[in-house]
Amino acid sequence: MSTTAPQRSGGDSAHPLSERGASEPLHSTGGPSGVPQGRAPHRVRVLVGLSLALALSLVLAQGLLTRALESIATERTDRQAFVSLRALEDLVQRAGGSGDSVRALLSSWQQQLPPGSAVRVIAFSGIKLEASTFPEDQGERAAPRRLSREEKPIYDRGQRLRTAVETNREEGTARKLEVEAEALPNGGRQLSAPVEVEGAVVGMVELATPPLKAPLKPGTGTLLLWLLVPLALCAGAAFAVRSQRVLVIASVVALAVGVGGYASYSLGMLDAQVRETQSLVAGQMRSMAERAQAVMAEHQLAAEPALQPGSWDADQYRRPLGLVTPEGAVNEAAVSARVAELRSGASRALGGLGALALAVLLFIGMGGLARTVETVVENRTAYLYIAPAMVGMVVLVFFPFFYGITLSFTDSNLYNTGQPLTDIWVGARNYVEILGDFNFTKEDGSTNYLNFYYTLGFTVVWTITNVVIGVSVGLILALMLNINGLALRPMYRVLLILPWAMPNYITALIWKGMFHEQFGVVNHVIRMFGGEGLAWFNSPFTSFMTALTTNGWLSFPFMMVVSLGALQSIPMELYEAARVDGASRWQQFTAITLPALKPALVPAIILSVVWTFNMFNIIFLVTGGEPNNSTEILVTQAYKFAFQRYRYGYAAAYSTVIFGILLLYSMVQNRMSRATEAA
């Protein structure tokens, strides 16, 4: 009896999938509802990505808008207070800065200030509180009286203002603040300005304002509107569109609508608040001008020179802002320029948020987040091991690095370190000042040693000469120590490595002493042979030679060790074969030794260039940049800009340029030599 299954007609039995229906696809992805499986996950990813991107960008945008509105409100209050303070300063100066006339004047002026305000006048002569309406200066402590020991901070503040005025006047610049502003515990502000009589600072006026009014807040409803509308549009597209690519494009468009709509709302709100501020300040100026004229007539103060209300609306350097005309009208041209500048900065910030939101959307919507989470979960043990190192790198390396770059776009200095970076942001001005200065000579015809390109040229010469000396001397000594049968070779190795083993700052100070004009051993040796000692640090060339000698002494042991290690790894059979073929010693050196040394020497030379380019200790301790900063290298120049001239932002930009130069050099050198690449 046969057990063979009956044959199917038509040859269908030869196909393993012949039992499928004629209309059934080869790889079915459908479910019971007929919707292709695998489509829903990418829809969810895109919608989740859009939700997070919109929420992140809009919340951050609202935070920036709130901060900007608070800044505008503070500026408005300060400017109105500045107008009152400067008007009072003008009147006190006309009253002579002290005496009964100042007290009578202050009593009249107090009536024009908002409730909760207070003013005081300090006279430096006799360290006196000349007049005051502050609550603590009533009764037994009423003016006039000598300042008490507890009030020393008030006197110190006045002396700072006097120093600032005198310094700015001597330097012909606005470097130190001539009006101080600080927050009070009750939420108000206290402003202090100097009083000048006949060109001399004789006192100070102070104005305390009532607590600031709550600034305008951006509406939460607007944020929700620009969050939910794009989400609803994208959700509708998700069920109408089958293509993942089209859905991603639709989500990008929805993101642009949401961020762009809120950006337009923010810019309009900022525009309106800035213009309202100008109107309020202009009104304040007109009111103060009218009241000042009345007070001058009431107390018979000198009418000459005429009042200049336009100068009352000023910054903390007492420079007129120019946003209000002397007649007390809004300067539309200046305000429009101010608004355009504000809109430009806000647009860049919002554009950055939009770019961040787009990156979040694409990262999540295209599956990057899912793959990252899967990788982290799969390799969680490895990530756990490297987590401490990653945290350390972020805290100790990446954060200082990026903070330094950020600082390079500011005008940070000793006098504004307490201000937010946004208030001292100057953009690329530091880089333009550094790289755009081509004044190689001063007005008197002497060399401008502070010029960046001079310092860069000197740094390049310094680096090349030091590396050439270090490599040449180190290689020659390594070849000598590699001679077979050399007596006392271990002792020579120890002695020759000592300069490298000793701390370089000690070596630098020793060599500086050796080059001392009167007591240095170098000049003593010169005198022993009938010569005259040199003033080594009085000439750029001889000063450079002292630093070159010191660094050459420090640099050759490193190259000697690297070269000696590479020489000992060369098989001796190669030299024996070359001698059999009749090769000379020079031919053996160029054909065998140098090629074998290249993989070790080239990375060492690259490292040596970077070290020498930034060799701070030798220049700073040996020459100190003498004479007249002629022997400064870039890194010592950056140090002096930061810690001797106190221009922190400029020094940060200088350091960033140095980093860029070294990064470019390393990339080019690696690409040309390929010494660090695997064979």
Image: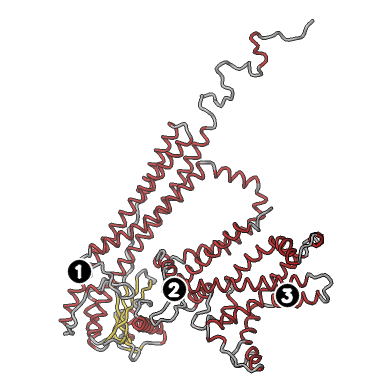
Label 1 sits on residue: 328
* Res. 413 mark: 2
How far, Cα to Cα, is label 1 from label 3? Answer: 77 Å
Residue indicated by mark 3? 497
**Camera-side residue of 504 and 445:** 445
> Which amino acid type is marked by label 2?
Asn
Identify the residue at horizontal 55%, vertical 81% (top origin): 541
- Placement of the N terminus among the 4 image quadrants: top right
Question: Which residue is situated farthest in the top direction here?
Answer: 1
Amino acid marked by disc 3: Ile
- Residue 396 horizontal/vertical position (percent): 58, 64
In this rendering, position of residue 436 left or right of residue 19: left
The correct choice, above or below, for 21 with respect to 39 in the image is above
Disc 3 secondary structure class: helix
The residue mark sitting in front, 1 or 3, is 3
Horizontal relation, residue 531 to residue 322: left or right = right
- 271 vs 571, nearest the viewer: 571
- Measured as percent of width and height from the top left, residue 81 is found at 29, 72
Up-down relation of residue 616 to residue 421 (above or below):
below
Mark 1: few/some/many CA within 10 Å (<14, 14-19, 20+): many
Circle 3 packing at 10 Å, graded few (<14), some (14-19), many (20+), is some
Q: Is residue 611 visible?
A: yes
**Apparent side of residue 550 relative to residue 96 in the rendered image (left or right):** right
Colour scheme used in the picture? Answer: secondary structure
Q: How far apart are the alpha carbons under marks 3 and 2?
A: 43 Å
Disc 1 residue type (three-letter): Gly
The tag earlier along the polypeptide, 1 or 3, is: 1
Q: Quadrant of residue 388?
A: bottom right
Depth order, front residue of 23/395: 23
Which x, y percent locates residue 96? 24, 87
